[in-house]
Amino acid sequence: MRTQPTSGVRQGGVPPDGGGPPRGALLRRRVGALLVAGALLLLAVLLSLAVGARHIPPDQVLDALIHGGDTENAQVVRDLRMPRTLVGIAVGVALAVAGVVMQGVTRNPIAEPGILGVSHGAAAGVVLAIAVFGVHDLYGYMWFAYLGAAVAAVLVYAVAAHGREGATPVKLALAGAAINAFLASVVSAALTTNAAALDEFRFWQVGSVSGRETRVAWVTLLVVAFGGCLVLLVVRGLDALALGEDVATALGQNVALVRLVGALAAVVLTGAAVAAAGPIAFVGLTVPHLARGLVGAAHGWVLAMSALLGPTMLLVSDVVGRIVFPPSEVPAGVMTALIGVPFLVALVRRRTVVAT
């Protein structure tokens, strides 16, 4: 008599949605959720282009995008808000997708993109640019932030890879914490001895998408696209890894390679986001959990949903920050923290956390 397999593993390494709705109903639910998330993102983009110190009617926003024009409203939309919105989209996608990848690679539901020291490395690069090389524009900061993020990630991986077991998730987390603490101390020491650098650095440190130029937006979008291509290489590997290292190996996955490429993708994405907008908290932590709650644990669907919800969260936070204390603006990094903290508290209070 034939018996059913007990491993609960579907062919191809994708974990089953056990106990969930039938396959057709699940597919319809996932597609419907993606369509709703896409509509919300379009609405957030429209609000980002229309709302601010100067409120512009939606029809004039669309006219400025389609036909251009030299009116003040058209120039505001095209030259100020469009680059800001593009950066917000790129940064939101990067942080959310990087969060999914890091939680999958480490199998840790509270992992976030900064675990590999990328944010603190980028901060150290910006301080170096200001204090040593006299760079005073956002576009110049970007390249030093990329360099700092890359160096920090290499240091973390080198420390974690030392030893017989290699770079395990626990060793990566511990090495990241150590490098983060070291870089934070270096940044603090540099800023306390240079008042001018401190005054300039604090505007970058709060995390914001305002004042970004078009060239910053396009560079960020290109780097995020490259990081996204790396993520596509490990989607099946992340699904297999969610079942455990032994099962992933049995399914033909090279666990070490999946983790290496996944970590590289997360570093590229997070480095792009931090370089363009500064450190923005909670997007990479909260969005993956929200996405899993909507579409299940399969990484392909989670990544797609996160790529829609991440920029939506960031753009909405940016819009709220523009109107909450007019005529001043609250940086997007502050608003995402205000939104993310209650979510994190709710996550902690739950009996269970959706597994990665």
Image (cartoon, rainbow, N blue to C red):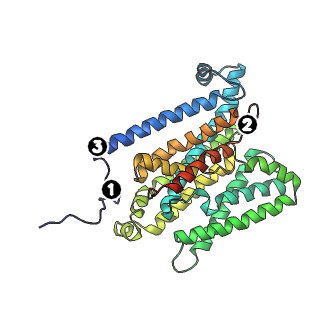
Eyeballing the image, is 120 above or below 159?
above
Q: Residue 162: x percent and y percent?
A: 58, 77
Q: How many marks?
A: 3
Q: Which residue type does callout 3 highlight?
A: Gly
For the residues labelled 2 and 1, the Cα–Cα distance comes to 46 Å
Q: Quadrant of the C terminus?
A: bottom left
Q: Earlier in the sequence, mark 2 or mark 3?
A: 3
Which residue in the structure is indicated by mark 2?
A: 329
Q: Earlier in the sequence, mark 2 or mark 1?
A: 1
Q: Which residue type does callout 1 highlight?
A: Pro
Which residue is situated farthest in the bottom direction here? 164
Q: Residue 217: x percent and y percent?
A: 65, 41
| Viewer-closest of 317 and 225 | 317
- Determine whether the residue tagged by mark 2 lies in a helix, strand or loop: loop
Would residue 342 be seen by someone viewing this image from the given angle? yes
- Determine whether the residue tagged by mark 3 lies in a helix, strand or loop: helix
For the residues labelled 2 and 3, the Cα–Cα distance comes to 46 Å
For the residues labelled 1 and 3, the Cα–Cα distance comes to 14 Å
- Determine whether the residue tagged by mark 1 lies in a helix, strand or loop: loop
Labelled disc at residue 16: 1
Which residue in the structure is indicated by mark 3?
A: 24
The reply to whether dot 1 and dot 3 touch (C-beta < 8 Å) is no
| Viewer-closest of 334 and 228 | 334
Residue drawn at x 51%, y 45% as measured from the top left: 307
Q: Residue 188: x percent and y percent?
A: 79, 61
Q: Residue 129: x percent and y percent?
A: 79, 54
Would residue 133 be seen by someone viewing this image from the given angle? no
